[in-house]
């Protein structure tokens, strides 16, 4: 009998390194972003709102991170899957906390989901760049 | 004078049999689903999240079951009724807990509504197959 | 650098065995209970409402299971810690989803938290008996 | 005519320094805490959940920080003001997000409110120590 399922959650140390790298990218872009990192079940692990980040961005960043972890899918991948599927396009988008535009990515270590990162503050193409800077940290671990 | 209205609610025994059949279908499909059964007024009766089911699927499965019981309509039947009725298409979809894509079905015994089943975890076409496996139990009762 | 933290979550197979044992105890007591099992982060894993369970018990059972997992403490242990600590007694009790009376227990495997069980429907002394019957399953694993 | 009201908000740089000092205290105490910093209007500015922090602590920490900033009062100061004022003692405590036990403090710079810090994870006496370590950063600024 299988008594339990093992899972991995992002450590605070790694989350902080990712936040730092993401924030540096935000500064480079010259725009204030909210940056959120959640653990595997989608609970908030670490968060920073850059000075001047729009109030609206606080929750969107957290929801993007949640969306990415809670379905193991980058938020920008949703629209292509919805656009020719009208019931989803008109229905799924109302799911509480689900964001279907760019700026949320699963965080994977050794191919395994350990959390999610979400960014909001600019156009989603900017938000995605900030996320990607955070994710780059994963390439140079150990 | 009518003093009361009688209603039938799904029993836990039947709910469990349906859950079991649905879960077996989920295992056959090789994907982890959340499976929910509600009684006639839409309250949770029985629930199982297969190991690895996405966090996002927990509430969606319950909401699909609720939607199906609370309006006596399979969730995949909504879109066809909304698509040429703009006020509904843009308005009704915001109703809390109402899901308008496949994966939620009323449960009927002798033609009478007794509850709802809802499944989430895959594309709604997968979710529907899992529901239908649960509903098949109803054909061979007694 | 620690990249992640490992954790264990209760399997559906174990959750179902515990539910079954708890329900059998409920039948023996002759009262209808709601019985909920959550995973380590407190998300619903499996649930059953016995026929006739009070509507109020559905959420209380889930909240007890959540409380037990989310703080790794049996819900009946709270009151002794609150009763001589007035700020907590008047304040902590308003925490959403936190239940401070009996009927919720952490589920541990090999001394490690893997989830929570919560029961509601009778007086909390009854609810505790139903939980304990579920927890007994853990003693005879393997 | 006064056209506007000026206010000061904690910077991310200061918030991060406070978080770091608070977390160091948490590590010294050997318990995992959630630590939240909000700006003057009570919106989340920065957050960290130490590895192993109880799920319940995530929201409580944020609510303590919110409470402290939103009323410019440390959360542990509430109970003494409520205890002989029954309408408040039985009423105010139900205010959503208001925490009336220790672990939340206003953050002031030059005597002016700029935000709040909130900590949860241990008994509130521990939570207060972690906050105070964060607040100590304010003494050695410039």
Image: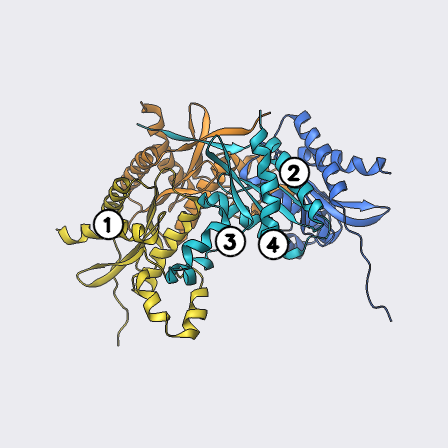
Chain colours: A orange, B blue, C cyan, D yellow
Between marks 4 and 2 in the image, the one whose residue lies nearer the viewer: 2
Judge if badges 3 and 1 mark residues of a common chain: no
Along the horizontal axis of the image, is D67 left or right of B14? left
SS of the residue at dot 4?
loop
Front position in the image: C132 or A31 = C132
Cα separation between marks 4 and 1: 41 Å
Along the horizontal axis of the image, is C41 left or right of B71? left
**Could you tell me residue A25's position as x and y percent?**
30, 37
What residue appears at the point 81 percent right and 39 percent down from the top-left corner? B138
Question: What label sits on residue D134 in the rendered view?
Answer: 1
Residue at the disc numbered 3: C99
Residue at the disc numbered 2: C21
Along the horizontal axis of the image, is D103 left or right of A38? left
Q: Height in image: A80 above or below C93? A: above
Front position in the image: D49 or C98 = C98
**Could you tell me residue B72's position as x and y percent?**
76, 51
Front position in the image: B112 or C103 = C103
């Amino acid at each position: 009998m299988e008594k339990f399922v093992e899972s991995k959650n992002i450590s605070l140390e790694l989350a902080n390194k990712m936040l730092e790298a993401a924030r540096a990218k935000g500064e480079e872009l010259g725009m204030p972003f909210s940056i959120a990192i959640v653990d595997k079940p989608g609970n908030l692990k670490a968060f920073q709102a850059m000075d001047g980040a729009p109030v609206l961005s606080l929750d969107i960043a957290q929801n993007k991170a949640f969306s990415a972890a809670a379905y193991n899918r980058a938020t920008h991948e949703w629209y292509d899957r919805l656009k020719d599927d009208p019931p989803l396009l008109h229905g799924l988008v109302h799911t509480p906390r689900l964001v279907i535009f760019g700026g949320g990515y699963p965080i994977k270590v050794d191919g395994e989901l350990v959390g999610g990162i979400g960014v909001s503050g600019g156009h989603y193409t900017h938000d995605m760049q900030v996320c990607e800077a955070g994710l780059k940290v994963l390439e140079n671990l150990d």
